[in-house]
Amino acid sequence: MNEPHRAPPPQLSDVDAHDEAAWREGLKDGMPTLFGIGAWGIVVGVAMVKGGLTVVQALGMTLMAFAGSAQLAALPLIAAGAPIWVVFCTAIAVNLRFVIFSVLLAPHFQHLPLRQRFLLGYASGDMTSALFLQRYPSEQPQRGKLSYLKGLMYPNWAAWQIGSIAGIFAGSAIPAEWGLGFAGTLAILCILVPLIANRPALVGVLVAGFVAVWGHALPYKLGLLAAVVVGMVSAMAAEELSDKIKEMRRG
């Protein structure tokens, strides 16, 4: 008897092939965030020039780092002449959330070459990672995943760089009395508030805020570094405690 014909499993090369429809879907889903990303890039670009960096230094920083919050955290440390290890540790602490994003995205793309994964990691952002994981919660191979992620990431990267470069070149022409530092604070708050989605996150924000104020007088802005670390630990502890309370109520 002839065995029934079985379709061969999809090859990874087929799964990762360009899918125009998925790319356009990613572009469409990420489009509403591009204006805010560009505006945030302008604020950071101006802040870099006003913080004492030359145009060349600011361009190098924004093209290599692609991390607005880390760039803003590093600027006062650089201006104060802080040791390089303090600058690096502060930037890493501020960007620790990308370790979580990487862990969540890795199972979807671990089969890709290292160079391609490195490029995707460089171009990833908060909103792009969140939108991708919302669209593809399953780790199973699926055609269009990579194209959808690229449709999110690359326009997001371009919007940031365009805004940041515009801010860098415009920085020297903008009067200091415009209060751009306050504008930057407002921009950070606009990003932060929507992320406070549960009680553990709220606990982390409140604790980090208290530690930042308490450690304001510490040298080299170490209070900021302490606030990030203590805030993250507090949020994780609050989440673990919340899970235990839920288990006890179920039991």
Image: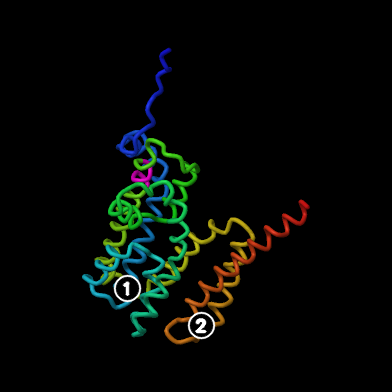
- Dot 1, crowdedness within 10 Å: few (<14), some or many (≥20)? few
What amino acid type should be assigned to the residue bearing mark 2? His
Residue 101, magenta (yes or no):
no
Disc 1, SS: loop
**Left or right relative to 127: residue 23:** left
The single residue placed furthest to the top in the displayed view is: 1
Q: Which residues are magenta?
A: 148-152
Q: Which mark is residue 90?
A: none
- Dot 2, crowdedness within 10 Å: few (<14), some or many (≥20)? some
Residue at the spot 37% in from the left edge and 58% down from the top edge = 39
Image location of residue 124, percent across then percent down:
37, 54
Which mark is nearer the camera, 1 or 2?
2
Image location of residue 98, percent across then percent down:
43, 60
**Left or right relative to 186: residue 180:** left
Q: Which is more toward the observer, 99 or 205? A: 99
Q: Which is more toward the observer, 181 or 144? A: 144
Residue at the spot 40% in from the left edge and 71% down from the top edge = 91
What is the chief secondary structure element of the magenta stretch? helix
The quadrant of the picture occupied by the N terminus is top left
Q: Are marks 1 and 2 in contact (CB under 8 Å)?
A: no
Image location of residue 161, percent across then percent down:
29, 58
What amino acid type should be assigned to the residue bearing mark 1? Pro
Residue bearing mark 2: 216
Decide: is 108 above or below 185: above
Residue at the spot 39% in from the left edge and 40% down from the top edge = 145
Decide: is 123 above or below 234: above
Disc on the earlier residue, 1 or 2: 1
Q: Which is more toward the observer, 42 or 62? A: 62
Is the image coloured rainbow, by chain, by secondary structure, or in one colour? Answer: rainbow
Residue bearing mark 1: 175
